[in-house]
């Protein structure tokens, strides 16, 4: 199993900005225990599981990992889960596997997080499917889920992922280096902890090009500081003399880009980002050019359905739509047909005409949708867009009805005051609650992280 875990591809790894490091006062030399509370279909919970699976083998079974599940319960009814009945069903089956085949559970989890194929992963891990199904049907899995629910209520846990190490709540960055050192801080006599090198200070030069909004450099700078255990970051505009010299030295032809010092290879996070980096003159360059939805597009998809909720009055939200369509085109993902559902409040005729144009664009090829959305993004106002695009006649009442339906659907998804959300096959939910944090819509690199919420949780969590 150790070899299997070492080969796991960790996807979508990112740290949420503004989170402080773990501080523990109680020390112990006993076997450390990690209690990770997740929703089985929450992308951030899956990310946290994959991060831990990627390094836990180094501890040679001296760390216990318990996966516990976050659900809701209404008076007089059964349990519900944020991502629907399918997620709740998987929670119960994972509980059964942990109880009946604990030694094979991590192998199953690694497989399921990549493929979402329960039957195949149980078969590959050598798990008795009939026994697991019977355990779920008997109600025993739900009894354990009830204990998890009681724990979450007592501890005030409402967001996936939430991690406890030896009963201490972990509030640090959800990254390998930070997690490993947090475990070792609570169990300093564990053999693997003695082999850890001192953390290195990775220097990063960020080449900007006047870009703001979804590429806001200060937000990226914050996240870089959380991704590596120690980081120093310089921001350099490519239009300055220094910026031009650096761009020439490292063959950077477009901004934004990040240049990492050569000692990045000494960090625990290097293996995660190495596939993205190009070595140039002893340093490593990340061109930040895939906008980060790649991991969504490359994941197995049943129906290739993509729903986008966007407020046309919010430029960051419109820019997000542009970026999604551009990435689909760049990666020749013609099988995805994004449907843009406009949300928000629109009072004048020009704004409603703009909404109508976007609705009609849903029936157009991506090559036609992109210039329309780009023009909408650059227009100073919806009225100016209407004047320049010549939107023509439209059914005002029908447009208003569609907006009302979309607003209701967005509310049902728990978007709150969010201005943008993306769903793929009705399972992936990416939601920028604060428009000022729309940089988080994009996985600009595994370093950057989605600031995504479905409620009152922390960035990078699914909150019930």
Image (tube, rainbow, N blue to C red):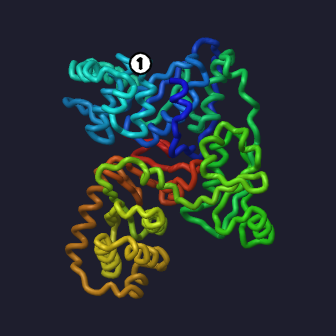
Q: Is residue 183 above or below residue 383?
A: above
Where does residue 1 sit, x and y in percent of width and height?
Answer: 50, 23
Where does residue 169 sit, x and y in percent of width and height?
Answer: 54, 28
Asked whether 181 or 395 is in front, the reply is 181
**Going 36% across and 39% down the picture, which residue do you hit?**
116
**Going 38% across and 35% down the picture, which residue do you hit?**
40
Q: Is residue 305 above or below residue 129?
A: below
Q: Is residue 453 above or below residue 389?
A: above
Where does residue 451 sit, x and y in percent of width and height?
Answer: 50, 50
Please identify the residue farthest to the top as the structure is shown: 30
Where does residue 52 sit, x and y in percent of width and height?
Answer: 53, 31
Secondary element type, mark 1: helix
Query: Where does label 1 land, which residue?
Result: 102
Asked whether 171 or 361 is in front, the reply is 361
Asked whether 154 or 177 is in front, the reply is 177
**Going 41% across and 26% down the picture, which residue do you hit?**
68
Q: Is residue 429 left or right of residue 441?
A: left
**Going 76% across and 47% down the picture, which residue do you hit?**
262
Asked whether 299 or 291 is in front, the reply is 299
Q: Is residue 423 left or right of residue 434?
A: left
């Amino acid at each position: 199993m150790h070899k299997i875990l070492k080969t796991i591809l960790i996807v979508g790894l990112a740290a949420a900005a503004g989170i402080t490091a773990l501080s523990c006062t109680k020390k112990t030399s006993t076997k450390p225990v990690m209690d990770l509370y997740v929703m089985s279909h929450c992308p951030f919970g899956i990310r946290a599981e994959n991060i831990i699976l990627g390094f836990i083998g180094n501890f040679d079974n001296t760390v216990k990992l318990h996966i516990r599940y976050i659900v809701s319960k209404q008076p007089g009814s059964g349990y519900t889960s944020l991502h629907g009945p399918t997620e709740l069903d998987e929670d119960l089956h994972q509980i059964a596997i942990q109880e009946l085949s604990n030694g094979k559970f991590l192998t199953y989890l690694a497989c399921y997080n990549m493929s979402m194929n329960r039957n195949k992963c149980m078969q590959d891990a050598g798990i008795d499917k009939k026994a697991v199904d019977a355990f779920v049907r008997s109600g025993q899995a739900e009894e354990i889920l009830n204990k998890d629910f009681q724990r979450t209520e007592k501890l005030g846990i409402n967001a996936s992922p939430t991690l406890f190490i030896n009963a201490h709540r972990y509030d640090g960055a959800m990254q390998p280096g930070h997690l490993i050192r947090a475990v070792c801080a609570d169990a300093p006599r564990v053999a693997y902890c003695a082999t850890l090198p001192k953390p290195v200070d990775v220097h990063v030069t960020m080449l900007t090009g006047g870009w703001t909004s979804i590429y806001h450099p200060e937000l990226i700078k914050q996240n870089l500081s959380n991704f590596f255990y120690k980081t120093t970051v310089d921001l350099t505009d490519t239009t300055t003399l220094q910026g031009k010299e650096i761009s020439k030295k490292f063959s950077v032809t477009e901004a934004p880009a990040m240049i990492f010092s050569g000692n990045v290879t000494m960090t625990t996070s290097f293996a995660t980002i190495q596939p993205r980096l190009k070595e140039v003159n002893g340093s490593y360059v990340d061109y930040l050019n895939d906008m980060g939805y790649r991991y969504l597009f490359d994941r197995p998809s049943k129906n290739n359905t993509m729903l986008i909720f966007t407020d046309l009055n919010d430029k960051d939200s419109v820019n997000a739509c542009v970026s999604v369509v551009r990435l689909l085109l760049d990666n020749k993902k013609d099988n995805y047909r994004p449907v843009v559902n406009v949300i928000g409040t629109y009072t004048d005729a020009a704004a409603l005409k703009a909404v109508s144009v976007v609705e009609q664009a849903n029936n157009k090829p991506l090559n036609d949708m992109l210039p329309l959305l780009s023009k909408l993004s650059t227009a100073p106002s919806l009225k100016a867009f209407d004047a320049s695009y010549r939107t023509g006649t439209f059914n005002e009442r029908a447009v208003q009805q569609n907006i009302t339906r979309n607003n209701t659907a967005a509310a049902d998804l728990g978007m709150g005051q969010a201005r943008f959300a993306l769903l793929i096959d009705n399972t992936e939910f990416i939601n920028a609650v604060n428009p000022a944090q729309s940089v988080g819509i994009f996985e600009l690199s595994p370093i950057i992280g989605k600031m995504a919420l479905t409620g009152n949780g922390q960035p990078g969590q699914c909150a019930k």
